[in-house]
Amino acid sequence: MRHTLLLLPTMAAALRKVLVTGANKGIGKRIATKLLTDVEDSFVYLGARDAGRGAAAVADILAEHPEAAGRLELLELDTESDASVKAAAEKVDSLWGLCNNAGVGFGRSIADTLSPNYYGSKRVCEAFLPKVESRICNIGSASAPNFVSGLGDASLKAFFTSSETSLEDLEKKLDEYSAAPDYEGVAYGLSKASLHVLTMQLQKAHPALHINTCSPGYVLTDLTAGMGASKTPEQSNCHVAPLHILFGDDVAHGWYYGSDAVRSPLDVYRGPGDPPYESDTW
Ligand code: NAP
């Protein structure tokens, strides 16, 4: 494991608080659980848009890990709602880290995919950034480099991978994409490539923080059901890169990490165990 396991006494004042959005199931629930079991001084806000589903997940985790009692709290939060995100942010004083995990998968229109996967993450970042002390982990996907590598136009490839692409220009481009039906199934990869543009822009605006994107790997969840993924979140390494980004002691600024917590390129797929991507720039 590359993250730091601190063996500090568990004192409320010293706990490092992390919000994980969309943590009532799937990868988010696994990340929340591993944060509690592997980082002794962590406190997790389990984000869920449905209070009942969130409470059930909290109860599940505490039943399996009673030692986490007092370090886990439900935070009702719909990332697609301004009012919900604002209300949630008002309940939180400070965060060590934020993990933008909430998202949807394939088979939706471009607008319906961008809404949680890009705009929802952006909304949560904007609301919580003043409270974040150290880390932001955006849950991306290998679909992002796959989307970029499939773009025929070199200038479009540069657009989706450059730290010079402003969010204003990005969102104009997303409006153009959204005006067309998702004929080629690009919605999901587009949303995750856009998420990393957000990562880079936020990193530039907040250089003292560590703001990174990672892939959790290909994992069997409701999002991928029937698509060939074989390992459940519990069987997979989906938590490894997020825990590294949130608590590792050699975390970069503005990188895209593969699921093995190794730097990966933005324009071509790099598999776990492949050599790291080396570059002096983003
Ligand atoms: P999942 O099991 O379907 O879980 C998605 C979670 O996001 C659920 O908790 C869902 O809440 C929540 N969510 C969706 N829209 C939301 C909103 N507007 N507000 C708050 N929560 C919302 O999918 P998953 O596979 O764990 O996916 C988690 C993240 O990993 C996603 O960002 C996904 O793109 C990414 N990812 C997954 C894979 C994979 O192989 N599974 C690969 C790469 C990246 P409800 O239960 O209320 O719907």
Image (cartoon, rainbow, N blue to C red):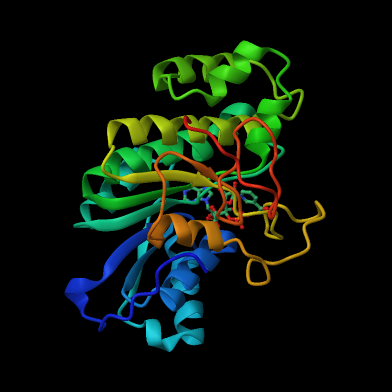
Is residue 49 visible in the rendered image? The answer is no
Q: Is residue 279 visible?
A: yes
Q: Is residue 155 left or right of residue 61?
A: right
In this rendering, the answer to whether 260 lies above or below 174 is below
Residue occupying image coordinates x 48% and y 72%: 33
Vertical arrangement, residue 59 with respect to residue 43, above or below: below
**Which residue sits at x=70%, y=49%?**
274
- Nearer-the-camera pick, 33 or 40: 40
Q: Is residue 164 toward the left or the right of residue 17 in the image?
A: right
Which of these two is toward me, 109 or 141? 141
Residue that appears at 57% across and 51% down: 262
* Residue at 35 percent of width and 36 percent of height: 203
Q: Quadrant of residue 106?
A: top right
Of residues 189 and 250, the one nearer the viewer is 250
User: x%, y% of residue 140?
Assistant: 56, 44
Name which quarter of the figure residue 259 lies in: bottom right
Left or right placement of residue 246 versus residue 90 in this view = right
**Residue 217 x %, y %:** 66, 54
Q: Nearer the viewer, residue 181 or 100?
A: 100
Query: Where residue 135 appears, x then y in whole percent?
Result: 34, 51
Q: Residue 101, percent across and down?
A: 50, 51
- 180 relative to 210 in the view: left or right: right
